[in-house]
Amino acid sequence: MRVLTFLAALSLSATTALAAEEPSGCDKFKWPIERERAALTAPDRAKLVSGSEQAALPSSAITLGLVAPAEAKLPTPPERAPKDGTFAGFTSIKAPKAGLYTVSLSSGAWVDVVQDGHFLKPVAFSGATDCDGIRKTMKYELSAQPFVVQISGAKDNSLSIAILPAQ
């Protein structure tokens, strides 16, 4: 009898988890994303290869080329192991100004921001499906030290990233 009760509870919890979907639509983000979305879809995005080093924060979004995780040579192993068949890459920024920044992605992927040898935790996160040009955005408090943005688990071999001062 206990086994049947356990199986019934397990079935119910699995059904509940599947029913909990991510928000859908551009109006479902927790804060306004128009500026980030415009940067991520701008035609003049710089195209960078994985491992590129930038002297300062880019003034607009970039499109980062990604490769197989084994080829990406991420400086720090990602906090979440990438699945087979996905892509990874990174870029480093040498001289940021300290402050609160949004890091936004055009499509789904895992993001690690690494500064001074430590993973930074986002102070806020928002994401939604079915919003053309932007999939998720996070806010990070950065110091005036070099940092690395690592992408892993991406389904495509490139994605756009916008790192902008938070408003």
Image (cartoon, grey):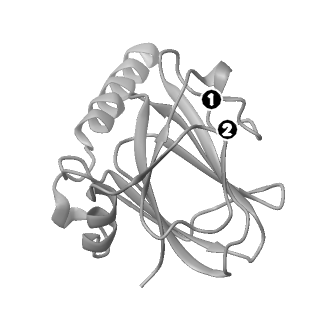
What number is the disc on residue 81? 1
Residue type highlighted by circle 2:
Pro
Would you say the residues marked 2 and 1 are in contact, meaning their CB atoms lie under 8 Å apart?
A: yes
Q: Residue at left 45%, top 40%?
A: 109
Examine the image and state in which quarter residue 55 appears.
Answer: bottom right
In depth, the one of 51 and 34 nearer the eye is 51
**Residue 100 x, y percent position in the rendering:** 57, 79
Q: Is residue 155 left or right of residue 146?
A: left
**Residue 15 x, y percent position in the rendering:** 27, 30
Q: Residue at left 43%, top 28%?
A: 157
Dot 2: what SS?
Answer: loop
Q: Is residue 77 above or below residue 149?
A: above
Q: Is residue 58 above or below residue 4?
A: below
What number is the disc on residue 78? 2
Examine the image and state in which quarter residue 11 appears.
Answer: top left
Quarter of the C terminus within the rendering: bottom left
**Residue 30 x, y percent position in the rendering:** 31, 70
Q: Residue at left 61%, top 36%?
A: 80
Q: CA separation, marks 2 and 1?
A: 6 Å
Q: Is residue 129 left or right of residue 115?
A: left
What number is the disc on residue 103? none
Q: Residue at left 28%, top 59%?
A: 42
